[in-house]
Image (tube, rainbow, N blue to C red):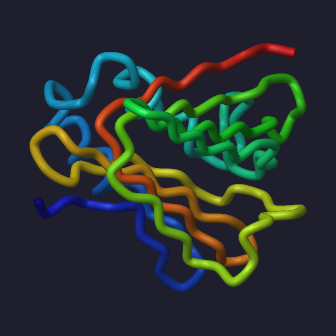
């Protein structure tokens, strides 16, 4: 599926095509995450709700007989809230990094993408160039005020 992504040109991030595409496909975004992924304040660099510059605090993958789960948690840049991304029915996890510890790593951008009819992708791009991409079927995003 062809999809507009957040783009970086000459060290500037562009979100317009990404949000335009998401709004066109709004009915296909799972209800559990629709409000979050469509909220531009989650992506912008200077809002209280942003994940830009959020600190990765937890990355935990569990596999059991019939379930696989991935939990990725962030502390907001204002230290006033935590975000928990809880993935289920994971198809693939890929890392663009040599260092899988992600120590002292701030999030630059995150984006929700469509992979196929019922499979989605979420990308996290970090300040030091690391990228984590998760293909999945279910996601819950929880915001906890501190």
Q: Compared to 144, does 96 lie above or below?
A: below
Q: Residue furthest front?
A: 65
Q: Is residue 83 left or right of residue 80?
A: left
Q: Is residue 117 left or right of residue 114?
A: left
Residue 8 vs residue 104, the one in the foreground? 104
Residue 32 vs residue 37, the one in the foreground? 32
Measured from the top left, where is residue 123 in percent x and y? Answer: 47, 57
Res 100 quadrant in image: bottom right
Please name the residue shown 47% across and 81% down the image: 9
Q: Is residue 140 left or right of residue 143?
A: left
Q: Compared to 4, does 69 lie above or below?
A: above
Please name the residue shown 31% across and 50% down the image: 113
Please name the residue shown 69% across and 35% down the image: 47
Residue 103 vs residue 66, the one in the foreground? 66
In the rendered image, the quadrant that contains the C terminus is top right
Please name the residue shown 71% across and 43% down the image: 46
Measured from the top left, where is residue 8 in percent x and y? Answer: 48, 74
């Amino acid at each position: 599926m062809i999809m507009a992504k957040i783009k970086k040109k000459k060290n500037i991030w562009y979100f317009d095509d990404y949000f335009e595409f998401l709004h066109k496909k709004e009915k296909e975004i799972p209800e559990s995450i629709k409000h979050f992924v469509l909220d531009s304040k989650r992506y912008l660099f200077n809002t209280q709700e942003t994940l830009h510059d959020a600190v990765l605090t937890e990355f935990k993958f569990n596999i059991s007989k019939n379930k696989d789960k991935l939990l990725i948690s962030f502390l907001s840049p204002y230290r006033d809230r935590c975000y928990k991304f809880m993935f289920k029915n994971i198809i693939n996890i890929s890392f663009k990094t040599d260092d899988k510890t992600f120590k002292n790593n701030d999030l630059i951008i995150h984006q929700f993408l469509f992979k196929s009819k019922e499979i989605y992708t979420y990308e996290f791009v970090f300040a030091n160039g690391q990228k984590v991409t998760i293909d999945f079927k279910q996601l819950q995003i929880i915001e906890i005020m501190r």
